[in-house]
Image (spheres, grey):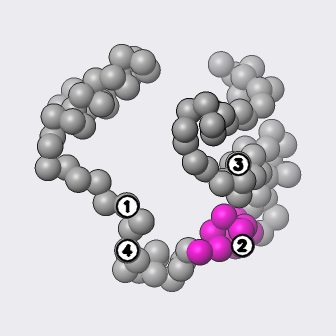
């Protein structure tokens, strides 16, 4: 595991094959945040200001975010609790990690 952290490339899933959408800006910011050499990482020179200046944050009102007054882009519908429980079970089986709160306590 340590070798992968130190040497492996960050690889994003294929957008078309998995029918997911993510921006080039996301790929770029993740790559910059995960640079192997910490001196080259985004934020290494000017901290949070450098990170928030990245174009991925261009549409984010940081003042509203900090004040917790911005509208979230997506609010999940939790009215059908079984749907989320089943998803948790599937993810747990893949990762061998307990996700539901009752199992973590």
Say which quarter of the image contains residue 3: top right
Q: Is residue 72 magenta?
A: no
Q: What is the chief secondary structure element of the magenta stretch?
A: helix
Q: Which label's residue is closer to the chain start, 2 or 4? A: 2
Residue at 55%, 42% in the rendered image: 20
Q: Is residue 99 above or below residue 67?
A: above
Q: Magenta residues?
A: 49-59
Q: Which residue is mark 3?
A: 27
Q: Nearer the viewer, mark 2 or mark 3?
A: 3
Nearer the observer, 62 or 19: 19
**The residue tagged with tag 1: helix, strand or loop?**
loop
Q: Which label's residue is closer to the chain start, 1 or 2? A: 2
Q: Which residue is mark 1?
A: 74
Q: Which label's residue is closer to the chain start, 4 or 3? A: 3
Alpha carbon of mark 1 to alpha carbon of mark 4: how far? 9 Å
Can residue 48 be seen? no
x%, y% of residue 60?
56, 74
Q: Residues within 10 Å of mark 2 (few under 14, many from 20)?
A: few
């Amino acid at each position: 595991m340590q070798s992968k952290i130190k040497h492996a490339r960050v690889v994003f899933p294929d957008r078309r094959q998995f029918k997911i959408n993510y921006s080039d800006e996301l790929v770029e910011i993740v790559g910059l945040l995960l640079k192997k050499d910490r001196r080259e990482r985004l934020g290494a020179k000017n901290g949070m200001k450098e990170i928030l200046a990245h174009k991925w944050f261009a549409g984010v009102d940081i003042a509203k975010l900090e004040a917790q007054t911005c509208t979230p882009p997506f609010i999940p519908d939790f009215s059908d609790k079984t749907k989320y429980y089943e998803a948790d079970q599937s993810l747990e089986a893949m990762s061998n990690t307990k996700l539901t709160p009752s199992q973590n306590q």
